[in-house]
Amino acid sequence: MRTRIIAVLVLIIPSWIMIPLEDRIQSENARLNYGTVRVTREMRDSIGQGMAIALLAGFRGVVADFVWIQSQGYFEKREWLRQYRNMEAASLLQPFSTFFWNIGAWHMAWNIGYAVSVDPANFTKAEGIKRQHEWWNKARDFLQRGIENVPSRPDLYYAMGWLYWEKYKDPCNAQTYFHEALEAKGAPMSLDTSFLVIRHMEARAMEKCGDVMGAYEYWKQLWFQDRTKVPEMWGVVEREIKRLEDVLNIPNNKRVFPKNQSKTTSVS
Amino acid sequence: MTEPTQKNIAAAKPKKEWVGFSVRRVATIGENTFTEAVRQKVYNILIVFALVVIASASFFSEFTFSEQLKFIKDFCLGALSVFGTLIAIVGTAQLLPNEVENRTIYTILAKPVRRFEFLLGKYMGSVLLIFVSLVMMSIMFSAALAFKEHRLVSDASRTMGNTSRVEEKQELQQQIQQIRSEVLDPNLVKAVLLIFAKLALLAAITLLISTVSTSMIFNVTVAFMVLIMGHLVGTAREMWSSNTWAKWLLALIPDLGSFNVADNIVLGNAIPWMHVGAVVLYGLVYTACTVAAAHFVFSDREI
């Protein structure tokens, strides 16, 4: 009996001594944004009993993936609302995954948006366009929620910019989001491909928004960076500078690429 | 004939010889436990099944590259955790009941082997089994990732060779760069390390349960209950954070949810080594206390 009491004490006392360490781990989890997800009734209805049990057993990522894979099946069956519900569930299970917000919004705006616009069930073409716009708005709201959950990652700002650019044909709003993508805490800082792709898009959006001179200056500023890095990216910059110099009638002596000189002798 | 007095009985009893603690004996028992476990059909079936499941993860092919890589990582780390849990619980739950049932425990304890050495050796054998299983599964996981990387990169390179548009080439270049950085993620090691720490703790808990009971089914069932409770403790603590009594009570159950950083590593969140160290320390302390408690219970047990 005495040893059993000792065994119980050996378990209890260190557990209580470790409460501060447990609190520290828990607060660190909260700080790093990977706390637990509460299984609400709606969540359980959405993902099913088996998935809810797996979720409780700590397999959040796997459950989110399976819910996501299910949503692809619904797309093929043209069950858009079910697909939407599953994409919502997956993003709620892993709200810090930019992947679900990003690809989910892309499905809504591009795939579902197009599919509903050519749906034979539409009475008129206008109805198809209206439904397509509704899905674009859903995608925008979905991305907005994603940005609120993960404000530090550039992906979602870039996706939002791309949505405004490509679907809404609104370059001014697109420029704002491309700029936000570059300003985000986790934005690429070095001259790598992703950094240059976002910069290219911001310059294009700036021009379409009406600030042609601003866009020209932007491209020029980009051109005078270290061009030994990512060499395949600079052809576009050169082409755009040349085009804008023509559009803006930049005097030959102020051009980066004077008309009578070749590329190799350009001002650098 | 004289009546046997208390003094005579005490004198007749063989004197208990003091045997010091020996790491070699622990290692021998551990090695033997590991060999026995590896020879069991249950273990072989589990490990083969785990390897097949992990290898099959590379067949997620109808998605974008980032979806495929995320699914492979989630699926494989999930498989590591599930099969590791099964191996840890089932492997440890049968250690003591089997020894008692086969009566081999009498032969071992009749020799100059302390009960603590026997128990620790059994536990070490179990931990070695978990470690070897995790290493095998991790190798298969790396192979699945490398296979997928090779396929995705060669697909992207082929498309790049066929296109003349500069923008498209840039996008593909960016894709290849992203695929490589996602596959060669050193944070995955942290996820596997924490899975190992969790499984070692689970094995210790199962060992403690098996020192109390003689039924393997009971041991397995209770260990699974503790596993589920351990994953719910975090939520319970959040809900009853203002209740001091609940906090003290919940501290008795290890928070197994703390070991689950795999989701976040897959999402690309940076997990500092300090945090990993704190969780490992937490697991180690719980494990040591559980093994010590198992020793106290076992030392008093009638065999």
Image: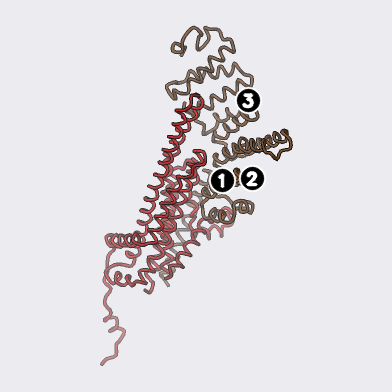
x and y, in percent, of residue B52 in the image: 42, 51
- Which x, y percent locates residue A178? 58, 28
Q: Residue at x 37, y 62 (%)?
A: B41
Task: Confirm whether circles 2 and 3 share one chain.
Answer: yes
Q: Mark 2: which amino acid?
A: Glu
Crowd tier of the residue under label 2, counting other residues whose Cα lies within 10 Å: few below 14, some 14–19, many 20 or above: some
In depth, the one of B130 and B70 nearer the eye is B70
Determine whether, in the image, residue B296 is placed left or right of residue B32.
Answer: right
Question: Dot 1 surroundings within 10 Å: few (below 14), some, or many (20 or more)?
Answer: many
Residue denoted by label 3: A171
Q: From the viewer's perspective, is A73 left or right of A262?
A: right
Question: Residue tagged by mark 2?
Answer: A79
Query: Which residue is depicted at the point 47% across and 58% down?
Result: A15
Tint of chain B: red
Number of disc labels = 3
* Residue pictured at 51% horizontal, 38% vertical: B64
Between the residue at mark 2 and the residue at mark 3, the CA separation in whole angstroms equals 32 Å
The answer to which image quadrant residue B31 occupies is: bottom left
A190 vs A229, nearest the viewer: A229
Question: How far separated are the C-alphas under marks 1 and 2?
Answer: 14 Å
Q: Which chain is brown?
A: A
Q: Counting residues from the N terminus, which is met first, the one under dot 1 or under dot 2?
A: 1
- A129 lies left or right of B9: right
Quickly name the residue at label 1.
A68
Is label 3 in a helix, a strand or a loop?
helix
Tag 1: amino acid: Trp
Residue B14 visible? The answer is yes
Q: Residue furthest bottom?
A: B1
